[in-house]
Amino acid sequence: MQIKVEKNVGGIEGLCVITPAVHGDSRGYFMETYNQRDMQEAGIPIVFVQDNQSRSHKGVLRGLHFQKRFPQTKLVRVIQGQVFDVAVDLRKGSATYGKWYGVELSDENKKQFLIPKGFAHGFLVRSDTAEFCYKCDDFYHPDDEGGLAWNDPAIGVDWGILGSYKGNAAAAGYTLPDGTPVDLSEKDEKWLPLGQTFSF
């Protein structure tokens, strides 16, 4: 097997951090970014149907997102730069409902984060720019998107951001430690807290 899988990270069932085997020398490196056989041997029998890629600048926070009627399992990684990637458990009846876990993903550590169906997902860009890739096990349905306020104090994600909660998800007043403003989309600034959010 060419991967190392840490299962149920943060004590949350289903979340996995995957580290690929990297083969390098003075010329560079080679690694398999996805191998279905290795995933099956690790007990992760998922079939992915879509690959996505985005580029964002420092301070951009995307999330927290989910698909309501067509939930997706996602395998996410960073090919350039550094992000802090977060998943929040939204599964009804889960012992860890409302609990979050975050992991640094970068082109240096090459880690991947497996986020099952039933989670909200988002990330914060900490480098000047970042290119973010993810595989999905269902197709994107544009009218099916839901979201959760990234700064909901009931969840308490520690993004490493300066600023205080003002009763909504607006980015105004929030910065990274170096003063870079947090940058959210208009849609992400309107998501509601956990108590008013869809649950699976």
Image (spheres, helix red, strand yellow):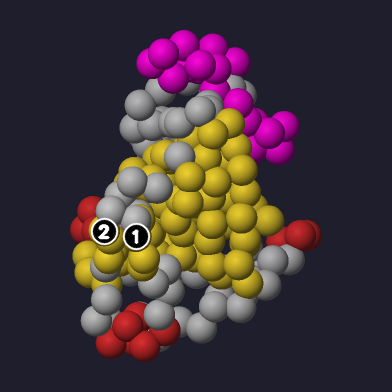
Q: Position of residue 22 (x, y in %)?
A: 28, 64
Can you tell which mark lies on residue 25? 2
On the question of residue 86 being in view, the answer is no
Q: Are marks 1 and 2 in contact (CB under 8 Å)?
A: yes
Image quarter where the N terminus lies is bottom left
Compared with 104, 166 (above or below) is above
- Closer to the observer: label 1 or label 2? 2
Q: Position of residue 103 (x, y in %)?
A: 32, 47
Q: Nearer the viewer, residue 72 or 77?
A: 77
Magenta segment: does it hold 187? Answer: yes
Residue at x 41%, y 13% (from the top left corner): 178
Left or right of 184 in this view: 48: left
Compared with 78, 93 (above or below) is below
Compared with 125, 178 (above or below) is above
Magenta segment: does it hold 106? Answer: no
The residue indicated by pointer 1 is: 29
Label 1 SS: strand
Q: Position of residue 147 (x, y in %)?
A: 60, 47
Q: Callout 2, which amino acid?
A: Asp
Residue at x 61%, y 43% (from the top left corner): 55
Dominant SS of magenta comes to loop
Q: Position of residue 62 (x, y in %)?
A: 57, 40
Residue at x 71%, y 61% (from the top left corner): 144
Q: Which residues are magenta?
A: 172-193
| Crowdedness near tag 1: few (<14), some (14–19) or many (≥20) residues, C-alpha within 10 Å | few
Q: Callout 1, which amino acid?
A: Tyr
On the question of residue 36 being in view, the answer is yes
Residue at x 67%, y 72% (from the top left corner): 139
Can you tell which mark lies on residue 60? none
| Crowdedness near tag 2: few (<14), some (14–19) or many (≥20) residues, C-alpha within 10 Å | few
